[in-house]
Amino acid sequence: MIAVITTILERIANLSRRQKQAIVLMLDMVICIQSIWIAYSLRIGVWIYWDLAIQKIVLAALLTMIPVFYFVGVYNAIFRYAGSGMMKTLVRAFIFYTVPMVVLFSIIGIAGVPRTIGILQPIIFFIMVGFSRVMARYLMIDLLGRSRFGGPVKSVLIYGAGNAGQQLAASMRSEPAMALRGYIDDDRRLDGQKLDGDKVFWSGNLEEVIHKHGVSDILLALPNISRKKRRAIVDQIQQFKVHVQTLPNMKEIMDGKVSFNDIRELDIEDLLGREPVAPNELLLGRTIVGKTVMVTGAGGSIGSELCRQIVKFGAHKLILFERSEFSLYAIETELRKYVADHNIDNIEIIPVLGSVADADRLAEVFAFWHPDTVFHAAAYKHVPLVEANPVEGIRNNILGTYEMAYAAHIAKVSDFILISTDKAVRPTNVMGATKRGAEQIVQALAEESETRFSMVRFGNVLGSSGSVVPLFRQQIQAGGPITLTHKDVTRYFMTIPEAAQLVIQAGGMAKGGEVFVLDMGKSVRIMDLAKTMVQLSGLTIRDKSTPDGDIEIVEIGLRPGEKLYEELIIGNDPQSTVHNRIMMARESHLGQDSLAKLLNEFQKCRNSEEAVRLLKELVPEFEHERDNVKVEKVS
């Protein structure tokens, strides 16, 4: 029987929109006639199938129903999305339908027709039409949809019995792979209540509800809560084997309406990121507003976010300097779309291909565009790759920074901000040493230049190309194992938008020669990060205590030059600034004569071992094991 119904529904589903509307109209006409028969028979007290009075009522009802339903939009609704919106449309339609029926039969009166028909028939008709829509939704989604889907159905709870949760539930009803079991809410007063027919459970009974209903997924419909509160909720959930997903922040939902398509994986950024701090508008404006701003490495993780923020904060011109053609195209396209979508017409976006190590190209760019502010984000940052290719790392990170800073000095640029890294502090790898070398170049130029040179040093940013987060996510999706260099490794983390905004504000405080250090919060143990990501995916850790778990975590040993933990300041005397998340340090550097001599030797160097030796002269605190150096071939 179900197979026959499903076949019929399949045929209906494949009809054109006009054909479907015609079918629904005919069904409504049949229901209208049935409601008249029921109302008339109930009023008379006996079942009368047809007489002259029924004929009069049918004629009046159909002549009223058809135009009213059409103009109100009853037949524009899609049954599979039947919900509160469709019911509101039906209520409006029946108000307009009931008024003429009451006037005609109850007030004016028609011979042979009881006056109560004008009220009784619309009520019965409304109930029957509403029931037909609910049944249609069930048949199209719960029966036909699941038949088409053919896969297992997930038992889902929505965490948050508010407006967002209600909208999400309504959207979910069109998802055949999802079966809503109810809502979870922290308000104990709502326990046992119903929202659109689905039960609300108190969060204190979460374990019992999960086991009772076989819940496999929990959707967080709490777009406006703080990260601290979100973290507390996830800590409560992650002890159970359930897959956790979330709605983004309400600001990220463009039209303010929530749908199932807005659901995304619960990124670790949602948990590690801190509460945003309102930016200091004066600091943002000093180096950005109304100025020509140049960003090197504009297509990279930090560079691209700096560009997004600069566009928002009102720069006059933005020069995107990038050596990768594809990366430059991607960020230019994104920014032009943003500018068009937000009607920003006072900024010029200038894409420039080039290398920071090309002095002639830099001189051309500075002479033609005259930038006021430069954010130097271009660098090789992948520790193992730079470790295996020290000569190229030096060319790009040290010599490239020198050429860039010197060009800015000659062009009398107002502000030059170098983007540095926590790996520059007491470095144990080539990449960190090259970044500390770049810092010293900027420090030396700051002593003699009209340009305000400064540096901003911070740790790992979540979601960057070198972050462990996307790597762990890929490994989990592949079924494991997760590869971890050491169980005790810790790292600082910060979201890319927060880092970029703090970099701009730090640049606004510069007077020349400062090393600004961003407050990264507490360091995170990478082993704990990996376990959390596994549990948030609804999976379990496979280890000695749980050999039947889903994902194994394997230690593969520290990579060449990798440290167990990172530092942000070489000395022990960081100074506070006007911004509570930006500290300042003044650190020593080589003299200009020694620096110039080493730069000249770097220019001629083509040997990896010699490059490392020179790095140790430039950065005396650089502790590097020669056994970890792999000789690169240089043509």
Image: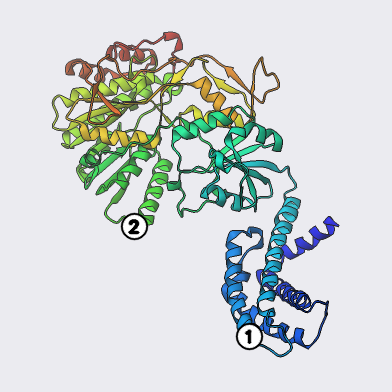
Of the two numbered discs 1 and 2 on the same chain, state the one appearing first in sequence: 1
Which is more toward the observer, 555 or 62? 62
In the picture provided, is 130 more to the left or to the right than 589? right
Distance (Cα) linking label 1 and label 2? 55 Å
Image height of 116 relative to 303, above or below: below
Which is more toward the observer, 398 or 54? 54
Give the foreground label among 1 and 2: 1
In the picture provided, is 41 more to the left or to the right than 280? right
Residue 372 in sight in this render: no
Res. 274 image quadrant:
top left
Q: Residue at (50%, 21%) from the top-left corner?
A: 526
Instruction: Tell me, for residue 31, which label it has, or none.
Output: none
Instruction: Tell me, for residue 343, which label it has, or none.
Output: 2
Disc 1: which residue: 104
Residue 340 in sight in this render: yes
Quadrant for the C terminus in the image? top left
Res. 96 image quadrant:
bottom right
Q: Residue at (38%, 14%) from the top-left corner?
A: 428
Q: Amino acid at mark 1?
A: Leu
Quadrant for the N terminus in the image? bottom right
